[in-house]
Image: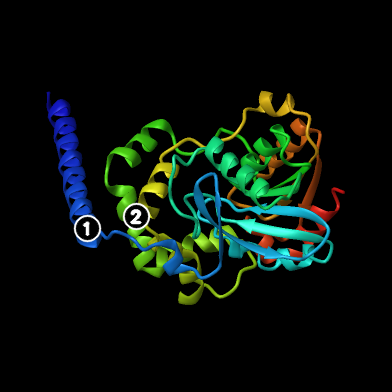
Amino acid sequence: MRLVRIVCGVLAGVLVLLAAVTVASLVFNAVTAGEGKPVRSLWSGRFVVADGVMTAFRQWGSHGTPVVLIGGFVEPSFVWNDVGPLLARDHRVYALDLDGFGYTERRGPWTLAEWADQVQSFVRTLGLGHPIVVGHSLGAAVAVELARRGVASRVVLLDGDALDSGGSPWFVRDVLVHTPFITSALRIATRWDWPAKKLLANAYGPSHPPLDHALVQLWTRQLDAKGADHALETVAGRKAQGFSRAELRGLHIRATVVWGGQDDVDGLTDGRGTAADLHARFVLIAGAGHLSMLTQPAAVAQAIESGR
């Protein structure tokens, strides 16, 4: 009986603590709540309506085969600022922000199908024919889906395995979706630098620029956009969207898989596995972390070109 009382006491303490944290989170969210800002007030770059979504994009080059660059989770198109000009020597290069990230209008539902519809519409609207599509991290699955649809002539999976596995366990995802904690975490990340610095240090890997306030703002300013909280809560609360191993093996697409040798976000084994499933060439970029296009842009550009 004593053991039962101890267990009941511990459980009661945990429930009280959870209730207190939940209340604190709700109060914090209420105090920091805001409507968000229109994307046009946050970024003065170019936009085009793609699949009904006002889509932010960048462009380099004036001739050659078109290349479309797609970022991953919470990655604005600036991540391609070094790779884009290198590819632009022989290509027309376009980098866009997927719905939910960067400075594209937030509409939803933030699924693989919707992102592919957005990029497919982007390609058609700009008259790009059948471009080479490069997808980083989460964007790798979007690139594969575009190849499956026949939109992309060739795809490059950069630090992304395009798998539907991974992500948080289902019970953690349910907690994220049905409690205020993820909203609090996102707002903390936009108001204090230290959480973002930790995440960026891991993503950049061993070679990264100074993790100062200016760099943090470059990444987190997008979170001021109208609807950004809801979009990120939705995406973070889901299982990773992509394909099964069997589905990848059943595809017949032209692909190259490129991976940072020091990528601690997505495993090297998964990258090699996806390359084997797609019968694709695998390129390892030594010394690069997950954000290989920022730390090793010349090597990434060369790997994209090498698939021709």
- The tag on residue 74 is none
Q: Which residue is mark 2?
A: 185
Which of the two discs, 2 and 1, labels the residue nearer the N terminus?
1
Tell me the element at label 2.
helix
Q: Residue at x 38, y 46 (%)?
A: 233
Image marks 2 and 1: residues in contact by CB distance under 8 Å: no
Q: Position of residue 7 (x, y in %)?
A: 19, 31
Looking at the image, residue 251 lies above or below residue 230? above
Is 152 placed left or right of 28 in the picture? right
Tell me the element at label 1.
helix
The kind of residue tagged 2 is: Ala
Q: Position of residue 260 (x, y in %)?
A: 70, 54
> Which is nearer the eye, 8 or 190?
190
Distance of label 2 from label 1 (alpha carbons): 10 Å
Q: Position of residue 295 (x, y in %)?
A: 68, 65
Looking at the image, residue 213 lies above or below residue 123? below
> Which is nearer the eye, 77 or 182?
77
Is 306 placed left or right of 133 in the picture? right
- Residue 289 appears anywhere in the view: no
Q: Position of residue 122 (x, y in %)?
A: 62, 49
